[in-house]
Image: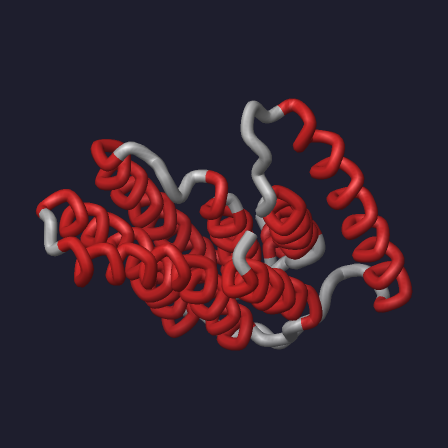
Amino acid sequence: MESVVVATLIASTLVTLCGVFTKTTKQLIRLLAVQAATLGLVELASCLINLILGLEFEALVDFFATFSEWFAAAVITPLIIYWGMIKTENVHDEPIINIKRVGLALVAIVILSLILSSFALRFFPEKIDALPFVALMFSISVFIIATRTDPLKILVGLNMAENALYPLFAESPLFLIPFILALMIFVNLVGVFIIIEAYRDYKVISVKAWRWIE
């Protein structure tokens, strides 16, 4: 891989890791926007360079498709979740397990992700160098989902996990991109709507509390 791509993947992984220790919903939403923006930046820049150098219709289509994916993940999705936070609460909390267990779990996730991704690389027809970073970001995102009781943070973790897969699907067929973007926006809108309605009914934002309130 090129050094710029490696630097981008490392930065995205570190941003995702910061989400584990983030306390407020607003901060985690910002990290989601940074993660998405960083992941798509290299591909977007590459499409822009091809457009400037080639000035072909195909390059123009590729650029707008890539820009649409990048804009939806880095801007639209965080804004949808931010709107949900405004309608509910900017929750200040920590993972539901103690820091020592968080540290041990993260170390285990790192080791397991690297082992599994290195093993899986042997079975692909072409080597996918980004797979270890993808596996690590995806595992950390799932960890965020599993250790939070704020549904908006859980939704952010779900989007981080989806963003983590982007390097593997950056070359998706163009006809699939509108469907993928529409589905992504729809899922987040429905998720935020459900969270807002539940908050209005229960007067509390914690998923754990929803289980006990009749």
Query: Which residue occupies the extreme front position in the image?
Result: 53
**Residue 203 appears in view:** no
**Depth check, front residue: 113 or 43:** 43
- Residue 142 seen in the current view: yes
Left or right, 24 with reference to 146? left
Q: Position of residue 24 (x, y in %)?
A: 58, 75
Provide residue 41's location: percent of width, then percent of height.
Answer: 39, 63
Query: What x and y, as percent, mark residue 69?
Result: 30, 52
Q: Is residue 58 above or below residue 33?
A: above
Q: Is residue 9 above or below residue 166?
A: below
Q: Residue at x 24, y 55 (%)?
A: 50
Please state if 176 lies on the left or on the right of 123 as rendered.
Answer: left
**Residue sitting nearer the eye, 164 or 25:** 164
Q: Coloured how? A: secondary structure
The residue at the point 65 percent across, 70 percent down is: 18
Task: Tell which of 53 and 187 is nearer to you.
Answer: 53
Q: Give the image location of residue 11, x and y in percent.
A: 58, 68
What residue is at 56 percent from the left and 63 percent from the top? 3
- In the picture, measured across the screen, residue 156 lies left or right of residue 131, that is left
Name the residue: 63% across, 51% down: 133
110 sits left or right of 9 in the view: right
Q: How many marks?
A: 0
